[in-house]
Image (cartoon, rainbow, N blue to C red):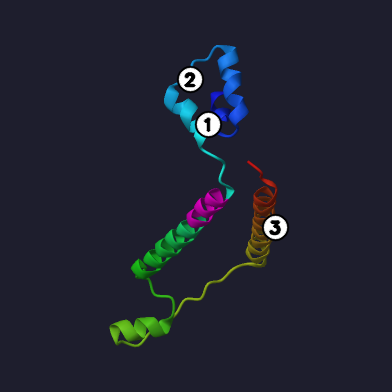
Amino acid sequence: MVGLIVRRRWLILLPLAAGIALTPLLARYALERPDNQRQRQTILASGAAAGLVLGLLIAGLLEYRDSSFGRAEEVHEALSVPVLASIPVMNSDRQCQAARRRRRVMDVFGAAALVAAMMVLALWRP
């Protein structure tokens, strides 16, 4: 009940009526601080942008530190020796179907999570 004081001025009377003693600083903060929707949106947007930049930096760092070879040309360029043989990846039909099914399930769950997050952001009114 004390946490609600910050949001609405009239709620400061509820804890007092219930016998909960408030500190003067909390009471002053509850009375003087107006709700600022623009500031809240700015903080949320800057947090989202910072998370995106941090994720891209981590992905770039992991890609930069990856020292594996992906193609035969990369081996030839790095070692200056010809590649004698390359072993292809061989999957059975069952493995290919399982991989397709996994991709479809991940696509559906990812889209559902994205839609759910968008709905929460659109409908959320603090």
Foreground mark, 1 or 3, reads 1
Residue under the image location 42 percent in, 59 percent down: 54
Report how far apart the C-alphas of labels 2 and 3 lie in the structure: 49 Å
Secondary structure of residue under mark 1: helix
What percent of the width, then of the height, locates residue 55? Answer: 45, 60
Q: Position of residue 26 (x, y in %)?
A: 46, 27
Position of 30 with respect to 96 (left or right) is left
Residue, disc 2: 22
Residue 46 highlighted magenta (yes or no): yes
Pick the front one: 65 or 97: 65
55 within the magenta span: no
In the image, residue 124 sits, relative to residue 18, either above or below, namely below
Numbered circle sitting on residue 108: 3
Mark 2 neighbour density, 10 Å: few (under 14) some (14–19) many (20 or more): few
Query: In this view of the protein, which residue sits in the foreground, 22 or 70?
Result: 22
Residue at 52% x, 15% y is 20
Query: What segment carries the magenta color?
Result: 38-47
Q: Is residue 114 visible?
A: yes
Please name the residue that numbered disc 1 is placed on.
31
Q: On residue 107, which mark appears?
A: none
Q: How many tags in the picture? A: 3
